[in-house]
């Protein structure tokens, strides 16, 4: 690996020296070459700006670890489970089973929310809208039974059943539970 790098470096160096020597012998003035080289450098620099930004951001992500593979994150109104973190981009799986490739520069410069960095669980809310004449105590009992049977819901975490809204003909309940798995 080191031998190939040294060989490539020497070949590149001698090609540049040979090119400059050929230009000198041909009589082309160096000031014109300098202007051309400067213009090309600016163009290449502007063209590679995003690539370099994503590369450096990837290195920062690898060392800082604001999120890990398997975490549930949100960026620019997109939520999902992190599938992969590479040098140039990261991949996320949305709840709709879409794979989203996010440039690492966007991850560092955007507003990133990590829902599972500190916890292995995520709070989820369920909304139930029922007729105003429904027996609410019976409904709460049924909700608790269903929640107890669901595999994804953490049984030891506290749950809440709250009144969310009341209208003339309906009652809306909000159930807050902790789930262990964000995506299937």
Image (tube, helix red, strand yellow):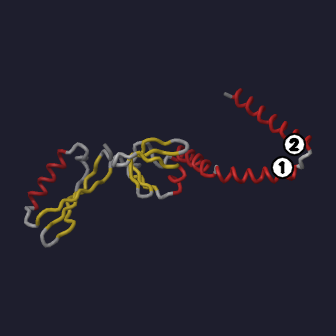
Say whether disc 1 or disc 2 marks the residue closer to the N-terminus: 2
Q: Is residue 91 left or right of residue 173?
A: right
For the point 43% across and 55% down, the residue is 113
Residue 173: image x %, image y %? 19, 62
For the point 13% across and 57% down, the residue is 140
Image marks 1 and 2: residues in contact by CB distance under 8 Å: yes
Q: Could you tell me which secondary element the residue under label 1 belongs to?
A: helix
Residue 123: image x %, image y %? 30, 54
Q: Which residue is mark 1?
A: 33
Q: Which residue is mark 2?
A: 23
Q: Is residue 183 left or right of residue 92?
A: left
Depth order, front residue of 36/45:
36
Q: Is residue 142 left or right of residue 79?
A: left
Residue 84 versus residue 46 in the image, above or below: above
Q: Please tell me how crowded label 2 is: few (under 14), some (14-19), or many (20+) other residues with Cα within 10 Å.
A: some
Residue 64: image x %, image y %? 53, 47
For the point 22% across and 59% down, the residue is 127
Task: Calculate the distance from the C-alpha at mark 1 to the C-alpha at mark 2.
Answer: 9 Å
| Quadrant in which the C terminus appears | top left
Residue 14: image x %, image y %? 82, 34
């Amino acid at each position: 690996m080191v031998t190939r790098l040294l060989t490539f470096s020497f070949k590149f160096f001698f090609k540049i020296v040979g090119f400059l020597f050929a230009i000198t012998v041909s009589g082309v003035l160096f000031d014109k070459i300098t202007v051309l080289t400067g213009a090309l450098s600016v163009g290449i620099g502007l063209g590679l700006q995003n690539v370099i930004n994503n590369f450096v951001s990837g290195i920062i992500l690898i060392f800082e670890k604001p999120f890990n593979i398997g975490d549930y994150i949100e960026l620019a109104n997109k939520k999902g489970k992190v599938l992969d973190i590479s040098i140039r981009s990261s991949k996320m799986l949305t709840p709709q089973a879409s794979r989203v490739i996010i440039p690492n520069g966007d991850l560092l410069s955007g507003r990133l929310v990590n829902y599972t960095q500190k916890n292995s669980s995520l709070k989820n809310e369920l909304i139930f809208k029922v007729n105003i004449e429904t027996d609410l105590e019976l409904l709460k009992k049924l909700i608790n039974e269903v929640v107890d049977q669901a595999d994804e819901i953490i049984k030891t975490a506290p749950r809440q059943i709250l009144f969310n809204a009341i209208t003339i003909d309906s009652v809306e309940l909000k159930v807050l539970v902790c789930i262990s798995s964000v995506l299937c």
